[in-house]
Image (spheres, rainbow, N blue to C red):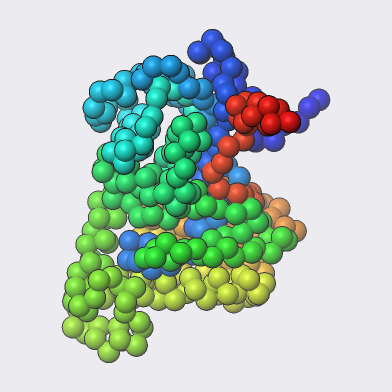
Amino acid sequence: MTTYSREEQLVNRLETAFVEGFGYSPSHLIQAPGRVNLIGEHTDYNDGFVLPCAIDYQTMVAASRRDDQCVRVMALDYQGEINTFDLSQPLVFDKDCLWVNYIRGVIDCLQSRGCKLGGIDIAVSGNVPQGAGLSSSAALEVVIGQTFNAMFDLSLTQQEIALIGQQAENQFVGCNCGIMDQLISAEGEAGHALLIDCRSLETKAVSLPPELSVVIINSNKKRGLVGSEYNTRRQQCEAAAQAFGVKALRDVDITRFQAQAEQLDEVVARRAKHIITESARTLRAAEALEQGDLATLGQLMADSHQSMRDDFEITVPEIDTLVDIVKAAIGERGGVRMTGGGFGGCVVALVPAELVDAVQRAVEAQYENATGLQASIYVCQPMAGAGVLKSVLLQQDVLNAQ
């Protein structure tokens, strides 16, 4: 019996659906990965540092160009629903088909930049768990940008594709997200995390020890308040930066914070403390990871979680319980913390491969008894960012060149 990888299963599913839905074979297969942030939470919109990695769960597109201005998009993850629109007409937000707005938004941003596009048939599907905080929306935006870039020879850089994805989510979809999710999906490197300076967008690949697994555990706690509380946290951070007279909290170090914290509202001060210490922790964590210093890395991840719990106040009891269970299973041989926007969602753990089974057993034995919920566990490896998997046109060009 043939065993297919996650990627192969997705490829087979997409190619079959494309042929059945559109009546011919796709010319291109293109992918963009989801991501998990190892450390650096809510620092992105404060111009700070983050340390995410792309994970081997992907959003994938099968596509072929058309000879008109029509775009047909088939969403396999929404019962094969097809949304059709005309590029010669203004693209507007579709209130009746919410998923297509991420795609329309990217195309709208490309056209507003003067990119010359044409009609296209697209089938899209993914195995990035939706609603878990692993950035399925950014993967969708990036894979669409990557698709048009490849098929219409737009010569966009990976960073430009990421910025277009962020612009689409900010301005078309209406979510005021930072750049991290799109940038790691576009620029990820296999076997590495990416230290991102969210002000300059400079990146540095940070090697993960090959014996480490990235374990993501979804608490399956329904994420409440995340939208309204996200905006509140952002406003509090902006208020703190204004009080310090700086562009963003990136520009305040811990010494200055401690000297002037009493001048801030008490809640605003705690929010600022998290951001200032979290950016510093992220830089130190990148160094520890490069050096294979798992004890230091584990302590930094623990400090990050405590800061999110006590100063930024974005964890929930279910998440705290998961962190405690995993920490007890790995000791000082790795790290664990909440990841994502907060108020539910996932924890991320960096775990030696030989301890992965012990972590899974501990979660299965203890978490449901403590919370009444069952966790979902994903064991991942850092993978490369978005790119073309298959191009019939490129293959034909190679044959012609020979």
List x then y, in percent, for residue 17: 55, 18
Question: Does residue 228 appear in the picture of this structure?
Answer: yes
How many marks overall?
0
Q: Residue furthest right?
A: 1
Quadrant placement of the C terminus: top right
Q: Nearer the viewer, residue 394 or 356?
A: 394
Position of 307 with respect to 206 (left or right) is left
Q: Residue furthest top?
A: 23
Position of 341 with respect to 39 (left or right) is left
Residue positioned 62% across, 26% down in the render = 392
List x then y, in percent, for residue 43: 38, 65
Residue positioned 37% across, 32% down in the render = 116
Question: Does residue 365 appear in the picture of this structure?
Answer: no
Q: Nearer the viewer, residue 288 or 104?
A: 104
Residue positioned 25% across, 83% down in the render = 261
Quadrant placement of the N terminus: top right
Q: Nearer the viewer, residue 295 or 169?
A: 169
Q: Nearer the viewer, residue 227 or 109?
A: 109
Residue positioned 60% across, 26% down in the render = 393
List x then y, in percent, for residue 377: 59, 47
List x then y, in percent, for residue 228: 25, 51
Position of 232 with respect to 305 (left or right) is left
Q: Residue furthest front?
A: 401
